[in-house]
Amino acid sequence: MTISADAISTPRYVLHFERKPLTPVVSKLQSIQDYHVIYGFSDKIHFDKFIANYPMPLTPYPLVKIHLKNVNESVGDGLNLIAINATGPDAAEVLAATNQDVLDAHINHLDQVPAAYRLKFDSEIQAYCVEEFIV
């Protein structure tokens, strides 16, 4: 995995709500049938900022390799993303890395992952639209 100018900090934490990883609301992706997106955070300052902007109680947990592997297996060929360091559930824009790139970064102890997608919040539908991130 080559890291370039479009790199973002490797997420090390997820936030749980009712014992499940918190997921952003994403508009239906027309070209992809199966997808999975969760929020991930590189450090405490980022998840604290998100928690301050979220109306329900959230609990931070380490993002562990076994979770990343299990999600890869359950989603298969679908789009599997981690939205990294969002400031809240309706942040205007959030960069995302693929679950596989994050898993590789954890295995290889890398501090950064390539940003592969961008989530843009659409206030009319109250959901994120996902697009490829091109620098």
Image (cartoon, rainbow, N blue to C red):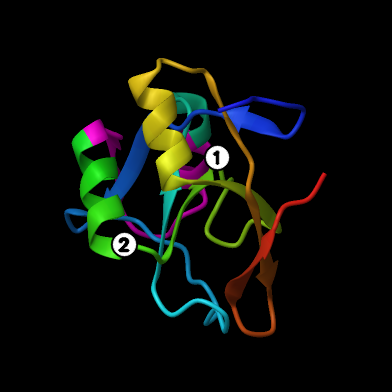
Against 56, residue 125 (above or below) is: below
Secondary structure under the numbered disc 1 in the rendered image:
loop
Against 19, residue 97 (above or below) is: above
Q: Label 2 is placed on what type of residue?
A: Gly
Q: Residue at x 57, y 75 (%)?
A: 127
* Picture coordinates of residue 122, whole percent (x, y): 69, 74
Report the residue marked by disc 2.
76
State yes or no: residue 54 in magenta. Answer: yes
> As drawn, is 82 to the left or to the right of 88?
left
Query: Dot 1, crowdedness within 10 Å: few (<14), some or many (≥20)?
Result: many
Quarter of the image for residue 90 reads bottom right
* Picture coordinates of residue 86, whole percent (x, y): 57, 46
Task: Looking at this view, name the residue that lies furthest to the right.
Answer: 135
Q: Residue at x 65, y 25 (%)?
A: 3
Counting residues from the N terminus, which is met first, the one under dot 1 or under dot 2? 2
Residue in front for this viewpoint, 59 or 52 = 59
Report the residue marked by disc 1.
85
